[in-house]
Amino acid sequence: LDVQARFDLYSVSNAILIAAQCPEATKLADFDSWKASGVYVRHGADAITILEPGKEYQRDDGSVGVSYNVRKVFDISQTTARDEAQPQVSYDDRLLLKGLIASSPVPIRAVEELPQGRGAVYDPEQNAILVKKGMDAPDIFRCVSLEAANVQLAQSHEGYSREAEGYKAYAVSYMLCQRYGVDVKGYDISRLDGVLQGQDPREEVPAALTDMRDTFKEINGRMAR
């Protein structure tokens, strides 16, 4: 999830490959691309292997498949650019909330109180996310991002169940916080282990991770704009 949060344009498979080889990666490019920008890969650096789609082909059963090509890339930490001061991006709390509110799939409304001590909740009758007044910016971001992720998943997947699949929204909220530097100490990501371990690792787990990635990419894309 940490890697996917930094590389939202990469597929789940490539995020897993990067996490397995260089989990702290922040910026990737192949040898020639680094060289073209005046940066050189350090001698002895181990390339990070990812996959990129190649040509389509027809299988024996008539269906269409896609071949994949191996691509060797290097993280900025493996190059001469690692010693140079890199520009740091930080976001004002007000700007972050403005971006999150603008990216929400439904309107967001402030209310005085919410049941069960919750900070934010989606109200299907109003088709809006209700947010309790008086919270600080990081709490608002965490609460609203969770509700927005649940709504986005429900809009994108017919039959989505918050009770059974809410862990996906939890992961999306975590990734959004990681992306924008919002404190994630309150997230217990280990709780996802039990959920995913009970699923088919060949079909259900990749599908769940893809749902998380696609939802994160959708909300993050709107926030970035």
Image (spheres, grey):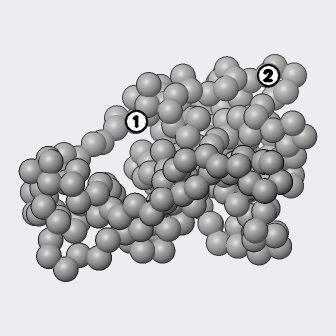
Residue occupying the point 19% across, 80% down: 44
Identify whether 124 is placed above or below 19: above
Instruction: State which tag comes first along the sequence, 2 or 1.
Output: 1
- Could you classify mark 1 by the number of other residues whose Cα lies within 10 Å: few (under 14), some (14-19), or many (20 or more)? some
Residue type marked 1: Asp
Identify whether 78 is placed above or below 30: below
Label 2: which secondary element: loop
Q: Is residue 111 left or right of residue 124?
A: left
Res. 81 in view: yes
Label 1: which secondary element: helix
Res. 186 in view: no
Q: Which mark is residue 52?
A: none
Q: Nearer the viewer, residue 206 or 154?
A: 206
Q: Which residue position holds label 1? A: 93
Residue occupying the point 48% across, 54% down: 52
Across and down, in percent, residue 140 comes to 56, 39
Q: Which residue position holds label 2? A: 127
Name the quadrant containing residue 120. top right
Name the quadrant containing residue 158. top right
Q: Nearer the viewer, residue 146 or 209?
A: 209
Mark 2 vs mark 1: give the one in front. Answer: 2
Question: Which of the image's four quarters has the C terminus?
Answer: top left
Residue occupying the point 78% across, 63% down: 203
Name the quadrant containing residue 167. bottom right
User: In the current view of this chain or complex, which residue is farthest to the front?
Assistant: 60
